[in-house]
Image (cartoon, helix red, strand yellow):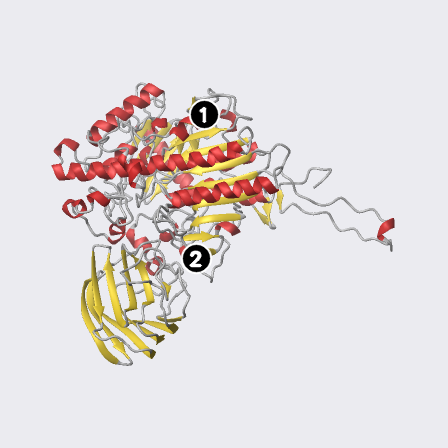
Amino acid sequence: MIGQQPDRTTLPIQEPIRQKSTELDVRNATAPPRFEVRAPKEAPNVVVILIDDMGFGVSETFGGPVKSPTMNKLAANGIKYNRFHTTALCSPTRVALLTGYNHHSNNMGSITEAATTFPGNTGIRPQSITPMAEVLRQNGYNTAAFGKYHETPPWEISNSGPQDRWPTRSGFEKFYGFIGGETNQWAPLIYDGLTIVETPENKDYHFTTDMTNQAISWVRFQQALSPDKPFFMYFAPGATHAPHHVPKEWAEKYEGKFDMGWDKLRELTLAQQKKMGIVPKNTKLAPKPTDIKDWDKLSADEKKLFTRQMEVYAGFAEQTDYEVGRLIAAIEELGLKDNTIIIFIAGDNGASAEGQMNGMYCEMTYFNAIPETVPDMLKHYNEWGSESTYPHFAAGWAITMNTPFSYTKQVASDFGGTRNGMIIQWPAGIKAKGEVRSQFGHVIDIAPTVLEAAKIPAPTEVNGIRQDPMEGTSLMYSFNNADAAERHKTQYFEMFGNRGIYQDGWFARTIHRPAWHLKPLNTLQTDKWELYDTKEDFSLATDLATKNQDRLKEMQKLFMKEAETYHVLPLDDRLLERTNAELMGRPTVMGNRTSVTYGEGMKGMGVDVFIDLRNKSYSITATIEVKDNGNGVIVCQGGRFGGLSFYMKEGKPAFTYNFLGMESTSIIAKQALKAGKYTLAYNFNYDGPGTGKGGTGTITVDGNTVAEGKLIRTQPGLFSVDDLADIGTDDGTQVTDYGTSSRFNGKIDKVFIEQKK
């Protein structure tokens, strides 16, 4: 709007009432001022960088072992926060960051794939909360997001939608990245806006590099066209979440660097943190959980495998820092450094212990409750981190990467799960250089900080709907005053029954379930609570519960009050059960249907979109036209690290079941089909009841049996989250070797799939 300030509390900002004219000739009329929404004068550009699964003690910037020159440079030119917190899990942290409201207020009590029908856990952002990107966009900003999103409910990730919770319907004008919780860095499932795009053909391809290239291209384009218009960029790599995929040369930088083991590295990291002033001098190393073996009690094979896992992770983390550096350098080359606020959050939660005690060659084993042995994983030692693996490191490294704390990702009741280093650089708004800020902060504080810096109020009404009051607290008060009294005085934490409450330096908590346990330690009613004075005990090393029982009781009452206020109750401590949509009562595209007909070209269908073939009998019937030497996929689900495929190879109908990338069973006809039209079918009779059982598979051509075989076992849970169901092709990584191409070289009329009782 030109000439006067608009009312920014109501969105969209209302345009003036159109005036009527009685003048016949435009030459005798005066045009009214043109309506245009502009950002407030001198509003800064905003770049929010969120790294995945990076613990407090990873980067050298926060005292860890991984080189991080980009973070070092940002910290030297800005300020770093050593008491900043996340929610302990990815989707909840991301929705809290991008809105300024607690994760349960956003109905994101867990990841989207574990949504239930209870308020606080539905996975559906309420209409009374509008994302920061949308607020900025409607106030004159250009907006873009790159990398991981993981806020869209999985049953909405299809053409059927609704697409209200996709990035480009949540305030971002541009999105390039992946929608799910993780991605194969070598073969990601990429969306550009609402459309799946093929991975660029490049032997050196890596997603973090690709998304950085896209981000650099976007900001250059934006500045070329609209240099007077501020931008908001959300840059969220899939790194350093599993799978730990990195070019070999990055991992080789750390060869031998972790031979001392995790116990010694914890001590070295804490000593460095004290030396740097990251933690107080009196900080103790919080107790290592008893489940984690002492390094000196490991076998030679265990030490060999585990050090390689950590070398790959460290290389992955340093490569990510390098790619962030390329983005920041591009922004500086455009002359934008002074009035660009860069918020770098080193982790959406603590480092992950989902690799269990030994780590994993294929992370999907975790979601199928299948243990991996050290001898089996050592077979992949030389290829660890390459495209032939889907790896995760051992839980001992996760504890170490969260030094000086005890626990990890998923454990919202320990700072190892929630304490993440943060750096803010803004030359135009922050005078301090290289200083530490120790005020308590939480991820819900980011949105109000950005809005205050941009001089934009949190809206009270959007699209005619009253908005809930912002729940976060702006951190701008601390930018130029290291000694300012903290303003975020109370904060609850909860994830899978792990819960805690912070108030004015006191922290009460209960460890309900460590991340490496599939079941809780106790019932919710019998959990043991602990109490800590965080002003004197940075790492939560000394439990004061028995000495101060009255305060503990007060804190427990406060937790229940906050839990009721923010839709945390009832607590839900189920884990793998919550991935079962039917059990949880959440929707799927299939609903109660037991059969569906697909057509050629349909692809990218996730587990909540595609018909469920797990733990049951089913049939696949395809009407196709075969060419000579017919080849390619009829229908597939999953990929290299677990999946199934009904296809043709060199004219022969075939079916392959790939069990977690560990073993494959193929059923193949002996005779090739001549060119012509056929009805091909695959029938599977499951050896139930129970989950993960095998069964008998039979292939027929026009009703005649041409092949039969036995599957010893099947995956009871998830296939790879990147490799979805496709008709006529196998995008991403491939279930099996199709020869020349996975794309079917004939014609598919229809594919009918039916569950059987």
Q: Is residue 452 left or right of residue 326?
A: right
Q: Quadrant of the N terminus?
A: top right
**97 up-or-down from 256: above or below:** below
Q: Is residue 514 left or right of residue 752?
A: left
**621 up-or-down from 355: above or below:** below
**Residue 696, can we see it?**
yes
Which residue is at the front of the view, 660 or 84? 660
The residue labelled by disc 1 is 79
Q: Residues within 10 Å of mark 1 (few under 14, many from 20)?
A: many
Residue 27, given in percent of the width and then of the height, sits at 86, 50
What residue type is disc 2 on?
Answer: Ile
The residue labelled by disc 2 is 157
Outermost residue, bottom side: 703
Quadrant position of residue 713: bottom left
Residue 96, given in percent of the width and then of the height, sits at 45, 41
Quadrant position of residue 595: bottom left
**733 up-or-down from 143: above or below:** below
User: Disc 1 vs disc 2: Cβ atoms closer than 8 Å?
Assistant: no
What residue type is disc 1 on?
Answer: Ile
Instruction: Measure how far apart labels 1 and 2 are at the Cα level.
Output: 39 Å
Which residue is located at x 30 percent, y 19 percent? 282
**Residue 445, can we see it?**
no
